Image (cartoon, helix red, strand yellow):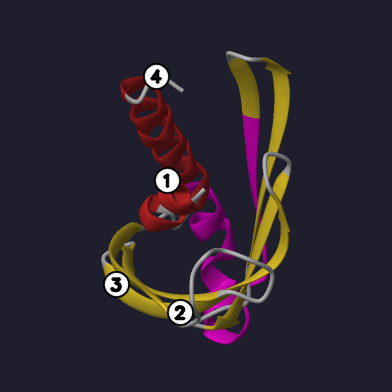
């Protein structure tokens, strides 16, 4: 789970991340990220809202350029197979609202890339 947070930020290239609360991951944990999205550096802080190991992880921005919630869900099929669903929910405000359709496409493409990277990491570790 913590590997996901390290590589995480849908639609972004994570530059660094810093835990703002003590580990391990739990409801209320806060993690600050600096990342690049569409060529711009962003800083934001996520708070863990739901954490059910192996089932669901919900992170919500506590600080950042626009409010967003990221939801991971897992479904186990057997000891060797599962699916993970990644969903981002958020509405840009102000000037960013004008670029919402473009941002939606960019995030969808970046999410697909993030999921390919995650698949690669898990396959290398024989999960």
Between 84 and 95, the residue placed more toward the observer is: 84
Between 80 and 69, the residue placed more toward the observer is: 80
Q: Are marks 2 and 3 in contact (CB under 8 Å)?
A: no
Residue at 41 percent of width and 28 percent of height: 122
Q: Which residues are magenta?
A: 84-106
- Label 1: few (<14), some (14–19) or many (≥20) C-alpha neighbours in 10 Å: some
Distance from label 2 to label 1 (Cα)? 18 Å
Q: The residue tagged with tag 4: helix, strand or loop?
A: loop
Dot 2 corresponds to which residue? 44
Dot placed on the residue nearer the N-terminal end, 1 or 3: 3
Q: Nearer the viewer, mark 4 or mark 1?
A: 4
Taking the image as shown, residue 44 lies to the left or right of residue 68, namely left
Q: The residue tagged with tag 1: helix, strand or loop?
A: helix
Residue at 65 percent of width and 37 percent of height: 85
- Give residue 92's quadrant in the image: bottom right
Dot 4 corresponds to which residue? 126
Residue 74 x %, y %: 69, 35
Q: Is residue 124 magenta?
A: no
- Label 3: few (<14), some (14–19) or many (≥20) C-alpha neighbours in 10 Å: few
Dot placed on the residue nearer the N-terminal end, 2 or 1: 2
Dot 3 corresponds to which residue? 40
């Amino acid at each position: 789970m913590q590997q996901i947070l390290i590589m995480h930020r849908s639609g972004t290239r994570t530059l660094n991340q810093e835990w703002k609360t003590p580990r391990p991951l739990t409801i209320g944990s806060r993690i600050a990220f600096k990342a690049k999205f569409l060529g711009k550096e962003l800083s934001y802080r996520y708070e863990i809202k739901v954490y059910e190991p192996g089932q669901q992880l919900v992170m919500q921005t506590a600080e950042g350029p626009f409010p967003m919630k990221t939801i991971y869900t897992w479904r186990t099929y057997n000891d060797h197979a599962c699916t993970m669903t990644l969903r981002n929910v958020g509405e840009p405000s102000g000037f960013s609202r004008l670029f919402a359709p473009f941002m939606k496409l960019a995030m969808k493409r970046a999410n697909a890339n993030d999921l390919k990277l995650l698949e690669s990491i898990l396959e290398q570790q024989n999960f």
